[in-house]
Amino acid sequence: MKARQVLAFIFCVFLLLGAAWAAFPAGGMRVGGMRLRFASYQGHIRDAMEQKVNVDSVLNALDGRFAMHEDTLAFYREFFYENPDRIYLPDDDYTFFDPVFRAFERARQEGKTVRVAHYGDSQIELDRISQDLREALQVKFGGCGTGMFPALTNTPMASVSRNSSGGFASYVMVGDSTTRHAGHRRYGPLTQVVSFNGKGTINLRPLKQKSTLEHLRSFQSVSILYGRASDNFTVTAQSDTTKPKPAVRRRGGLTWTTWTFPAPVEKATLKLSGSAEIYGVSTDGAAGVTVDNIPLRGSTGHVLVRNDKDLLKNALELDGTALVILQFGGNFVPASGSSKAISGHMDKVRELIAYYREVTPGARILFIGPSDMAASTEDGRIVSYRRLPEMVDSLKAVSLANGVAYWDLYRMMGGQNSMSQWVRHRPPYAGPDYVHFTPAGAKVVGETLSRSLLTYYDFYDLRKTLPADAVQQRMGR
């Protein structure tokens, strides 16, 4: 075959492909029992016209929205009532977090640790998001260490190395076929209980990787929360040869014991003897704030209401929890195919909120809804779940109506179809499942959440110096 004949053949092939591209319907065509699909001009135009989110532009605009104006009160008014990155507050009450901030400030003054309990689904596993919030709060209010974690678990941890040996057996509220459930509901604040009998040790070391945040690299105190202990149960703590005396507090059959070292340490060992139910171990600073990372993979959050209410109430009072964060919704999104389904889920969210308002009467609650999430359509396109905006708006409305603050992660990302762009970002901010953040993306989320919460603190701090009636008049609400 001559060269011009080869070129003519190639030209004809491209001509036929071009004609098919121009004429083929975007949704494909059905032939018999099959649907044939082909790249189409209509689909190309549709994709070109579809809203695309430039992640860097979104984050740059976010930076601008946190920039203080020359008129300070005007900045706060605009932030609290108009800024899409704000935390939405019940009745637009800008004093909502004041009790939390007072507790944070008193922590260092009174030599104690105040806690934030961060519950969530797999988005917060491996301390993602939680660690950046913890770091920001510890920079501001003091403290160090990882916070509370189970004495024994199969779930990997990114912040602390914990090696347990002896008579430990772990039971979980949420888990797969490789985990065990207890024959009771006494799971405690971490939704996991460790049954201990005999003798055992727990060795603790902070993980020191390149990405380890500064305040996670050491700790100055070790605590243990336990109940149903035998008369001969004992537990001691030491680091090298240092054996500090314990400080013990009790409430409702629970014991919270803390050992504080003279200076920050990089390892510690707990030695146990007897029998008890252990609900958590904590590495913290001598005083300040910490964030407990409590992930429940695959959960919508409603399972939390099965936890023993009295035990949890006593535990959260003992350990000094001032703020509870509930970050759920993503695991329900694939099932949110109708308004009726979303409405039914909101009934469970109301029950969850009512449960935590009852067990934490002195704390504040912040609900964080789902991120943008995307899935493949029939024609192979990756787009956001269709009812995700309805889901997010419903969660926000239910939270605010029930006395709980709300942070809109979905719109902070950029809203509809933003997840696809977070996946394509360099470095990637989300993984190829179009659901979970990468460590880099989780850091962006955690730092933005921290900035938003601390903006409310800065206003709280400013209000100490201003007449209350003048502030109310300028804020206009």
Image: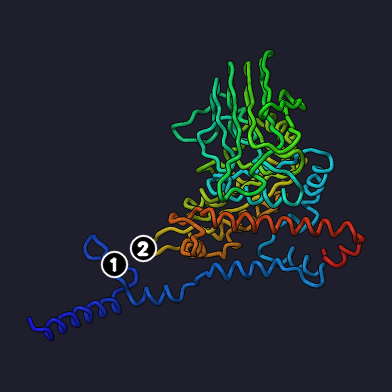
Colouring of the image: rainbow
From the top left corner, tell me how far across and down residue 252 is, in percent. Answer: 74, 25
Q: Position of residue 312 (x, y in %)?
A: 68, 32
Give the CA distance from mark 2 to mark 1: 10 Å
Residue 37 badge: 1
Q: Residue at x 50, y 34 (%)?
A: 154
The reply to whether residue 236 is in sight is yes
Q: Which mark is residue 226?
A: none
Does residue 46 lie above or below 147 as drawn? Answer: below
Residue picked out by circle 2: 380
Nearer the observer, 247 or 330: 247
Image-based side of 400 in relation to 105, left or right: left
Q: Quadrant of residue 157?
A: top right
At x 66%, y 15%, the residue is: 230
Residue 408 percent coordinates (x, y): 62, 58
In the image, is residue 63 above or below residue 209? below
185 to the left or right of 10: right
Disc 1 element? loop
Identity of the amino acid at label 1?
Arg
Q: Is residue 171 left or right of residue 74?
A: left
| Residue 345 in view of the camera | no
| Residue type for callout 2 | Gly
Question: Mark 1 and mark 2 in contact (Cβ < 8 Å)?
Answer: yes
